[in-house]
Image (tube, rainbow, N blue to C red):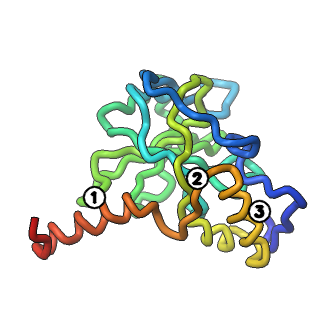
Amino acid sequence: MPREQEMPDKVRLHPAIDDGVVAGSESFSGGTLTCLCVDRPVKVRIDGQVAHNHACGCTKCWKPAGAILSIVAVAPTANVHVTDNGDKLQVVDPSALIQRHACKACGAHMHGPVERDHAFKGLTFVHTELSKDKGWQAPQFAAFVSSVIESGVPPRAMEGIRGRIREIGLEPYDCLSPALMDVLATFAARKAGTLRE
C-alpha cells in the first residue's frame, strides 16, 4: 500500500461489508475456509459458529488487496482443523501473541491460535471471508480503526472512514469493543490478585 494512500470519494472498507453488513445465522454449524491458491489450496474447517467477528484496522491482520480493514473472528481452537495442504502454512511472526498461519504461496492467513498465557488463550483468529459457506456471524464492531494510518491511510481520511463504519451499522473503536476490553482487564486483575468477586 502506498505511504500516503488517497481515499476515493466513497470510502471502500472491505468487500465483505462495503454493501452493508449481512446477518449471520443462529443455526449455522460451521464451514470451510480456503486460501486463494488455485493449485493445492489450503483448507481449514471450523466446527460451529465464530464469535466476536469484527472489522480490524491493525497492520497485522490479513486483508484482501485494496481493503482498508480486515474482517476477523475467533473460534475455539479445538473447533479449527487444517484439512488440506497444511504443509503450505507458515507462521508469519513467531514472536506475536496470535500465531498467524499464512499460506506460503498466496499469503492468506488461514488460522491464528493464541497459545500463550492470555485472556484469549484457547481461541483461534480466522477470516470467514475465505469461506463460500453462508451464515457466518456478521461483523459486530470495528477495532483498532486509528491503526489504518500506520498502513498509509492519511489522517485526514479518518473522519470519513469512521463515518462510513457507522453508516454500515458498526461502532468504530481504537481498541477492542468494551466487552472484550473487560475480558482482558478481568484476566489481568485475576492474575494480579486484585479482583474481588
- For residue 55, the mark is 2
Rounded to the nearest whole Å, what is the CA distance between mark 1 and mark 2?
20 Å
Q: Residues within 10 Å of mark 2 (few under 14, many from 20)?
A: many
Q: Give the structural element (helix, strand or loop) at label 3.
A: loop
Rounded to the nearest whole Å, what is the CA distance between mark 3 and mark 2?
18 Å
Residue 126 is situated, as x and y percent measured from the top left of the image, at 49, 42
Q: Does residue 189 appear to the left or right of 47 in the view shown?
A: left
Q: Which residue is mark 3?
A: 1
Does residue 181 lie above or below 26 as drawn?
Answer: below
Does residue 133 lie above or below 99 as drawn?
Answer: above
Residue nearest the viewer, comparing 75 with 181: 181
Does residue 52 lie above or below 87 as drawn?
Answer: below
Does residue 150 lie above or below 23 as drawn?
Answer: below
Residue 92 is situated, as x and y percent measured from the top left of the image, at 51, 54
Name the amino acid, label 2.
Answer: Ala
Name the amino acid, label 1.
Answer: Ala
Q: Give the structural element (helix, strand or loop) at label 2.
A: strand
Callout count:
3
Task: In the displayed orientation, state which residue is furthest to the right.
Answer: 9
Q: Residues within 10 Å of mark 1 (few under 14, many from 20)?
A: some
Q: Residues within 10 Å of mark 3 (few under 14, many from 20)?
A: few
- For residue 119, the mark is 1
Q: Earlier in the sequence, mark 3 or mark 2?
A: 3
Name the amino acid, label 3.
Answer: Met
- Please identify the quadrant where the N terminus is shown: bottom right
- Please identify the quadrant where the C terminus is shown: bottom left
Q: Closer to the camera: disc 1 or disc 2? A: 2
Q: Does residue 122 appear to the left or right of 128 in the view shown?
A: left
Which residue: 44% across, 47% down?
52
Q: Closer to the camera: disc 1 or disc 3? A: 1
